[in-house]
Image (spheres, rainbow, N blue to C red):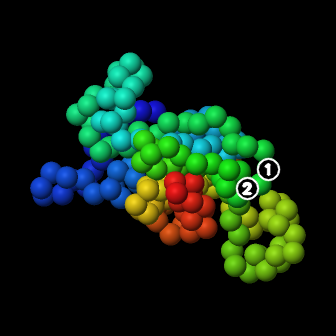
Amino acid sequence: MGSARPPTGVLHDGTVPEPVFLESAAAEIEAHVGDSGWDHAPVLFALVRAGQFAVDEPDTAARLGLGEDAGDALTPIEQDGLPDGPLDEALAQIGWPGSVAGCALCQEIVMLPPAAQDEVADDPAAAASHPLRCEARLVVAVLRGGTSAAVLRLRGADGAADDELLTGPDLAPNLVAALLATLE
């Protein structure tokens, strides 16, 4: 982790829109977590501006190959484990200092088609063993200004990751809201 190369999507004036930096950081997080396989607990990341990180933490930034010229690119910094308990309660205990531009959470989820959701509505644990379930790794990233991005990678039938990475800011609106609340 830690490369802060400007992502594709540079505008004509040479700037990069914030959503592009955020999507790039979310994809970088998914790839980083994916390197260790599946069946992991949720992982939380602070998102800091690479240029400012290079000024504030020059030794660490140098080890990561970051320079002050990295500008507004986002550098994800993996945090220690989340507090025990339900994810919503754990996130409610978190607050970030002003030097953190945003945050991201990577978690594995189970998705069901709408008809199957009705079948397990009274028993959420049944979703994990439902024959129509689809497992995925979801990364949701947010910035203080309210910008959000999400990436989703489906788990293949053989346990390997699907090659396709789905993106969109509206993949997990409740998680976006919970992460934004940690930045207030």
- State the residue in front, 53 or 63: 53
Q: Residues within 10 Å of mark 1 (few under 14, many from 20)?
A: few
Tally of numbered tags? 2
Q: Is residue 19 above or below residue 30?
A: below
- Amino acid type, callout 1: Gly
Q: Position of residue 126 (x, y in %)?
A: 85, 65
- State the residue in front, 15 or 53: 53
Q: Position of residue 130 (x, y in %)?
A: 81, 65
Farthest residue, direction left: 13
- State the residue in front, 136 or 147: 147
Q: Which residue is mark 2?
A: 89
Q: CA distance from mark 1 to mark 2?
A: 7 Å
Q: Residues within 10 Å of mark 2 (few under 14, many from 20)?
A: few
Q: Position of residue 8 (x, y in %)?
A: 27, 50
Q: Which residue is mark 1?
A: 85
Q: Position of residue 45 (x, y in %)?
A: 54, 42
